């Protein structure tokens, strides 16, 4: 068994332009790498999405690493200082789409697992749950894999997700939970007509305005232990009307709520629908709400596992990380159905940006964190 160079493996992965939902051979690289370490690999394809579940060992405890090989689009190609998929190292910094989010974490954990296996430090099992559908709609990725593994009775005891959780400097933050997320589209249908004859029409715009004003007027909460306050943001308002003398027949808006455990997605969806209906009362207009709940809020309670992760980070970074629930959603929202989950990775400041980049030294530091985490895990959870 040969050692794995985390930086070179990251570069190999970046050179596979796996923009969601394309795989471009990225999953083959992960599978080949893990199979070479003795992992039993299962490709789990759902729809057009490539997923992989790989496990080394057959006994418990089973420590799982979860991540994604898919990346967001490059954007303005001309704005990049280097080819986004060339994976060039300039001045000790690796530039490329996926360098931070999150091909480097996959490579770092694979390299850490290789060392642990070679040192005989895996009396239980190590597994990888890798998807190609985290940056997209996330319907055929981790969600489907988790459902399949749960149906089979696959036992996963704890999970580490390699999202870029550090905020300003490496190791200053890990994520122990996430807020929930709900998107909703409100469509108000009225009656189109001439602006000079409003009695023959029903304008949907005032109804939509009343609904949005009522929704934004509510203070959802003042926060929740370990969570920031929930927030509602209107993200789009659309009235498809190009004429100046026509009362439109329809008006639409989209909004998103990031919510803490004070709420559930279903409760918020019902509230949005009720406010839309109330705004339409007494008018000929009809309001319809289409909600999409991306995930519920969750928290991995403080305890031996969170302490173990924090200690591994502190050993390498020289600082105790903040245990945070801030930021957007991640696939941890699906994995929590199987086991406690903590997220720890690189500094996320350049993710999704032009010239996404990661210092080579920090990729190696992340590997060191994972090495300590694996070794201590099997000592703590025997």
Image (cartoon, grey):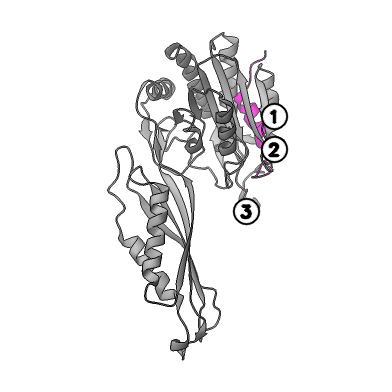
* Whole-percent x, y for residue 2 in the image: 67, 14
Mark nearer the N terminus (2 vs 3): 2
Q: Which residue is drawn at 38% across and 51% down?
A: 267
Secondary structure under badge 2? loop
Examine the image and state in which quarter residue 207 appears: bottom left
Instruction: Tell me if residue 60 is in the magenta stretch.
Output: no
281 and 12: which is toward the camera: 281
Q: Residue furthest bottom?
A: 196
Q: In this view, does 277 lie to the left or right of 247?
A: left
Q: Are marks 2 and 1 in contact (CB under 8 Å)?
A: yes
207 and 375: which is toward the camera: 207
**Which residues lie in the magenta part?**
1-25
Q: Residue furthest left?
A: 222
Mark pair 2, 1: CA separation: 9 Å
Mark pair 1, 3: CA separation: 27 Å
Please give the residue where the numbered disc 3 appears in the rendered image.
76
Please give the residue where the numbered disc 1 appears in the rendered image.
29
Mark nearer the N terminus (1 vs 3): 1
Can you tell which mark lies on residue 114? none
* Whole-percent x, y for residue 203 in the image: 45, 79
Can you tell which mark lies on residue 16? 2
């Amino acid at each position: 068994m040969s050692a794995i160079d985390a930086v070179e493996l990251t570069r190999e992965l970046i050179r596979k332009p796996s923009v969601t939902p394309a795989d471009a051979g990225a999953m083959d690289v992960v599978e080949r790498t893990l199979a070479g370490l003795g992992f039993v690999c299962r490709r789990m394809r759902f729809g057009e999405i490539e997923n992989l579940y790989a496990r080394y060992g057959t006994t418990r405890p089973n420590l799982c690493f979860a991540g994604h090989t898919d990346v967001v689009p490059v954007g303005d190609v001309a704005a990049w200082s280097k080819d986004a998929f060339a994976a060039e190292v300039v001045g000790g910094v690796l530039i490329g789409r996926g360098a931070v989010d999150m091909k480097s974490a996959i490579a770092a954990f694979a390299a850490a697992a290789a060392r642990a296996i070679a040192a005989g430090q895996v009396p239980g099992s190590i597994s990888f749950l890798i998807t190609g559908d985290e940056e997209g709609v996330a319907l055929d990725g981790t969600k489907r894999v988790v459902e399949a593994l749960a149906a089979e009775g696959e036992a996963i005891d704890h999970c580490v997700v390699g999202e870029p959780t550090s905020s300003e400097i490496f190791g200053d933050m890990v994520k122990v939970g996430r807020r929930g997320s709900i998107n909703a589209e409100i469509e108000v249908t009225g009656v189109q007509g001439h602006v000079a004859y409003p009695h023959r029409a029903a304008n949907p715009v005032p109804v939509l305005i009343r609904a949005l004003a009522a929704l934004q007027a509510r203070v959802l909460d003042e926060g929740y232990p370990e969570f920031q306050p929930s927030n509602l943001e209107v993200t789009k308002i659309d009235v498809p009307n190009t004429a100046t003398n026509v009362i439109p027949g329809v008006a639409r808006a989209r909004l998103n709520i990031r919510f803490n455990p004070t709420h559930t997605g279903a409760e918020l969806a019902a509230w949005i629908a009720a406010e839309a209906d109330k705004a339409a009362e007494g008018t000929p207009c009809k309001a319809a709400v289409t909600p999409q709940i991306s995930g519920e809020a969750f928290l991995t309670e403080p305890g031996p596992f969170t302490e173990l992760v924090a200690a591994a980070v502190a050993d390498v970074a020289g600082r105790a990380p903040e245990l945070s629930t801030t930021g957007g959603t991640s696939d941890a929202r699906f994995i929590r159905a199987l086991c406690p989950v903590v997220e720890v990775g690189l500094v996320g400041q350049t993710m999704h940006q032009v010239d996404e980049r990661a210092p080579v030294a920090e990729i190696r530091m992340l590997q060191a964190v994972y090495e300590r985490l694996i070794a201590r895990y099997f000592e703590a959870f025997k």
